[in-house]
Amino acid sequence: MSSVLMCASPIYGHVAPMIPIGHHLVESGHRVRMITGRRFADAVTAAGIEHISLPDACDFDDRSPEAFPGGEGLTGVRKLRFDVEHHFISVMPHQYRAIKEQLEREPADVVLSETSFTGAYALTLEPAAQRPPVFVCGVVPLTVSSRDTAPFGIGLPPSQSFVGRLRNRSLNFLVQRILFADAQKSAQRHLHELGLPPLPCFVLDGPTQVDRVLQLTGPGFEYPRTDLHTNVSYVGPVLPPSGPFEPPAWWPELDGSRPVVHVTQGTVANKELDKVVLPSIEALRNHNVLVVVTTGKEETAAELRATAPSNVRVEAFLPYAHLLPKVDVMVTNGGYGGVQFALAHGVPLVVAGDTEEKPEIAARVAWTGAGLNLRTGSPSPEKIRNAVDRLLTEPAFRAAARRLEKELAQCSPFESIERAITEGTAGTPGFPTPPRRDRPASLGMF
């Protein structure tokens, strides 16, 4: 059995899928440690994983605006640029040292990180013979540049036409050489201070440098790339098990007598419910639908419940394994895990997200045909109502969602990840080594 050192930035949506992966590895007999934030210690240890706290310098609480002041109100590329600099680049040296400290304390056969833990990318700059293989679980859409896609964060659909590739090349140049030039310099400065060679690629192309990328979705949800690195595998989403469930008193109303619309702002971005939740309630209050809202917090749920229209049901939390089989449409701010869970149940989506990676997730939902991208994080009730009506009346959306449901049902993420670890640590012949590039692929030839 292998010794696995897992790493996750202290962001709920990034830690959440890593814990069941670690639990599966523990149950399979592997030795598993996880470096992540202190606030996740109980959940990590409950899964049988040894918890290792991040250093204070990189252990932040993404729920608190005080963690990184200056990012409030930013959206789109400006927000992505802020997050890359503060959430990922500035913490890279501390994450890297945390990994090195643990490897010196106890060697590992493989380092299993998630996309945003940039300390793992720094580790790949060491000679391969002097470090364990580094794998990354893709908990957000692929960030890597391509001649077939616009830069990550812009939210534009892919294009492989001559004109489309010209667009992609121009936008990639703008993003990499101008908009993110300071972020790139900052990353290289940190690496120099660590005594490491420079990153041989654009900072968001870090996944191209690791030994394996295990993307937590199916290929049908990700843009096709003719220049996709051979280190990328699609293993499918990590879906929490159903577990015991005590349904609320109104649960029998989910009997199919009227369409069910689920509304959520996710597990973190649920402080300002006027972004998606309240406009959705207003949009659907007179519709012949049952609206099921989850808020993430019991106090917020109680407040909403007291004033909710007669066709709205509000809970702090409902397990998706039980709820989504009864849902006809999901309205969401676009968290990666929630979107994957909906598609795994064939539920079409209305996505309203404009921060972090959410514009990219919304764009992919629209590109697959499994939903609509409202292109804003604060949609009007009218915009939501029109989108929900389209998803309920136009069968193409449900058909596209069900195609993805069938694809995801064929995936076995836990087994695929464990197999990759076994192959990687055994030195299996043909184990892919990511190509090294002197410049990003997106700036290459058409």
Image (tube, rainbow, N blue to C red):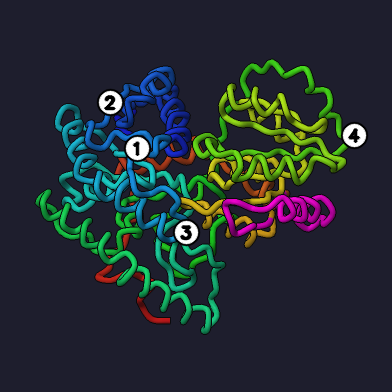
Task: Tell me if mark 2 has few (under 14), some (14-19) or many (20+) residues whose alpha carbon lies within 10 angstroms of its own.
Answer: many
* Of callouts 4 and 1, the N-terminal one: 1
When the figure is inspected, residue 422 is found, relative to residue 171, above or below; the finding is above
Residue 187 quadrant: bottom left
Q: Amino acid at mark 3?
A: Gly
Q: Which residue is mark 3?
A: 76
CA–CA distance in space, label 4 to label 2: 49 Å
As drawn, the label of residue 312 is: none
Residue 257's mark?
Answer: 4
Q: Which residues are magenta?
A: 372-401
Q: How far is disc 4 from disc 3 in space, using C-alphas?
A: 40 Å
**Mark toward the viewer: 4 or 1:** 1
Q: Residues within 10 Å of mark 3 (few under 14, many from 20)?
A: many
Per the model, the C-alpha gap separating discs 4 and 1 is: 46 Å
Task: Tell me the residue that label 1 is attached to.
Answer: 66
Q: Nearer the viewer, mark 4 or mark 2?
A: 4
Q: Secondary structure at mark 1?
A: loop
* Three-letter amino acid code of the residue under disc 1: Glu
